[in-house]
Image (tube, rainbow, N blue to C red):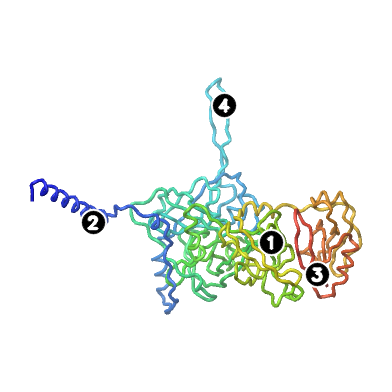
């Protein structure tokens, strides 16, 4: 072998060996860059059955092992921001919101500063932006500093600071990575991290939890750091209303949860996270625990994490408000059972309107899957990728019909704004005649009133001018509603509507199509 070839051979050998040594050193020193898949990995879940007996050390051991992964979260926000109670509908002052959820005394955290202007000997007082402070809890899910908490803990926060267990004096700055108002879930990440490794939460399978199972809650209620409480699962899959037409399945527990526990973990007897403490039911005389608390199931959180880490949660919407099929008289819809969802409202220009869905239709199948209830349909729709076209089977006038719907993207904020608009009421002198057995007063719809109600040209009906609060229609019809049809028969006047309502036997339902707000609404009312 020539000298030149020998030199090239050994140079190549040295290069290969250097690369190998470098790779080994990098792997041992953890210098290799993490892949995108590692960054968005969902924490593993233990689905093994919960077995074994409890002893005197069980809960002590859980608290000792799992408290370190719980954090205390303190936020700062502009007090003038409009804050609403995520589950209660809002309406209170910001101070009430903080007091209820975080234990923050009303008015604390607000103040002003003073500047002096040295020109001309004048002093100028400047009111600073009012600030409010609040506290909550959270739990660490990865060594990268990702933390899960409630959306209402960090929503609208201008500053987020996190304290770790055993180091209450040090506060680490955090940022919001993604949030989801529908499940009241948020993912935040530490911008500043401690030198040591962060403890991570271990996840259990929330679908395994059943009433009577032992659970432990850890959090920071009323600023009492890292409080541990123990109880049982009171109910699983408890459906709670989030906004009009949308519910969430929650775990209910009697483990004491108080303001400040929001965002903390609910653990099973293995010390695994099976829920995130979110809200409580409290009495008018006390904001504290009454033994009824709710947690977002851990499986719901895990399913959301990939989207939360991208910064956006995308859900489907088809533009309908649906209600349950009535307990009785479901045969009048042409149904064989109560399975299905009754279409009450179709949003103008929405996916369902474009596909031909009408108020009064009963959706019995969505994308090839049977619809057991209105809640079941909502879950299917929000889980559908926007832009997907799906077949929907409906029952209309006792006949089955299949329509194809292209799913829109859900904008929850816009949807809540639309549902919260006030309905227009007519203030003119009402007709004294009442629809027999329903407790409503009706009168003819005038052109001027129709214009005020923004009804399409040419539409006629009977105006609901008064409601008996103890009548059958209370809670179903409203002042200002316009009855368009009863049991599939179009009505043009108050007399037409009364005649059709009188035909309904006592104890049976009337299927009523209304004009309400800016669109058609379908309701069913049982006659007294």
Seen in the picture, residue 287 relative to 413 is either above or below; the reply is below
Tell me the mark number nearer the camera, choosing from 1 and 4.
1
Q: Name the residue beneath numbered marker 2.
A: 24
Please tell me how crowded label 4 is: few (under 14), some (14-19), or many (20+) other residues with Cα within 10 Å: few
Q: Nearer the viewer, residue 106 or 427?
A: 427
Q: Residue furthest front?
A: 2
Instruction: Evaluate whether residue 236 shows in this view.
Output: yes
Q: CA distance from mark 4 to mark 2?
A: 67 Å
The residue closer to the viewer here, 256 or 25, is: 25
Quadrant containing the C terminus is bottom right
Task: Estimate the spatial distance between the alpha carbons at disc 2 and disc 1, rounded to whole Å.
Answer: 59 Å
Q: Which of disc 1 and disc 2 is earlier in sequence?
A: 2
In-image side of 119 versus 326 (left or right): left
The secondary element bearing badge 4 is classed as strand
Q: Which residue is mark 1?
A: 321
Q: CA distance from mark 3 to mark 1?
A: 19 Å
Cα distance in 3D space between marks 3 and 2: 77 Å
């Amino acid at each position: 072998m020539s000298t030149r070839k020998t030199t090239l051979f050994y140079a190549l050998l040295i290069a290969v060996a250097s690369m190998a040594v470098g790779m080994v050193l990098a792997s041992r020193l953890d210098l290799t860059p993490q892949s995108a898949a590692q960054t968005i990995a969902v924490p593993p879940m233990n689905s093994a059955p919960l077995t074994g007996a409890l002893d005197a050390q069980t809960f002590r051991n859980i608290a000792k092992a799992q408290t370190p992964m719980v954090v205390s979260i303190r936020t700062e926000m502009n007090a003038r921001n409009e804050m609403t109670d995520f589950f209660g509908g809002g309406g209170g002052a910001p101070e009430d919101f903080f007091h209820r959820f975080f234990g923050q005394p009303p008015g604390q955290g607000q103040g002003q500063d003073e500047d002096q202007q040295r020109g001309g000997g004048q002093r100028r007082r400047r009111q600073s932006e009012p600030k409010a402070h609040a506290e909550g809890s959270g739990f660490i899910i990865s060594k990268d500093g990702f933390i899960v908490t409630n959306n209402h803990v960090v929503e609208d926060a201008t500053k987020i600071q996190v304290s770790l267990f055993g180091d209450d004096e040090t506060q680490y700055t955090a940022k919001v990575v993604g949030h989801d108002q529908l499940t009241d879930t948020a993912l935040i990440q530490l911008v500043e991290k401690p030198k040591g490794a962060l403890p991570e939460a271990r996840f259990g399978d929330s679908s395994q939890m059943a009433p009577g199972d032992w659970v432990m809650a850890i959090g920071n209620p009323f600023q009492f750091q890292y409080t541990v409480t123990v109880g049982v699962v009171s109910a699983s899959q408890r459906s709670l209303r989030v906004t009009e037409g949308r519910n969430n399945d929650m775990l209910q527990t009697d483990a004491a949860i108080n303001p400040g526990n929001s965002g903390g973990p609910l653990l099973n007897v293995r010390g695994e996270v099976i829920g995130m403490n979110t809200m409580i039911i409290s009495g008018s005389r006390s904001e504290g625990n009454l033994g009824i608390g709710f947690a977002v199931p851990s499986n719901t959180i895990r399913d959301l994490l990939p989207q939360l880490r991208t910064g956006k949660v995308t859900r489907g919407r088809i533009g309908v408000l649906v209600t349950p099929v009535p307990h009785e008289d479901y045969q009048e819809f042409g149904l064989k059972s109560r399975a299905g969802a009754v279409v009450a409202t179709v949003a103008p220009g929405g996916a369902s309107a474009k596909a031909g869905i009408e108020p009064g239709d009963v959706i019995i199948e969505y994308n090839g899957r049977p619809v057991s209830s209105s809640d079941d349909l909502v879950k299917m729709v929000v889980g559908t990728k926007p832009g997907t076209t799906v077949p929907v089977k409906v029952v209309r006038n006792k006949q089955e019909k299949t329509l194809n719907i292209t799913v829109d993207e859900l904008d929850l904020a816009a949807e809540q704004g639309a549902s919260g608009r006030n309905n227009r009421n007519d203030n003119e002198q009402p007709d004294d005649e009442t629809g027999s057995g329903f407790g409503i007063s009706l009168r003819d719809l005038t052109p001027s009133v129709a214009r005020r109600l923004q009804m399409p040209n040419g539409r006629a009906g009977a105006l609901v001018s008064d409601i008996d609060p103890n009548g059958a229609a209370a809670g179903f019809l409203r002042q200002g509603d316009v009855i368009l049809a009863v049991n599939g028969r179009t009505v043009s006047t108050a007399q037409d509507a009364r005649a059709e309502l009188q035909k309904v036997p006592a104890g049976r339902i009337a299927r009523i199509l209304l004009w309400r707000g800016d669109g058609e609404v379908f309701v069913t009312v049982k006659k007294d």
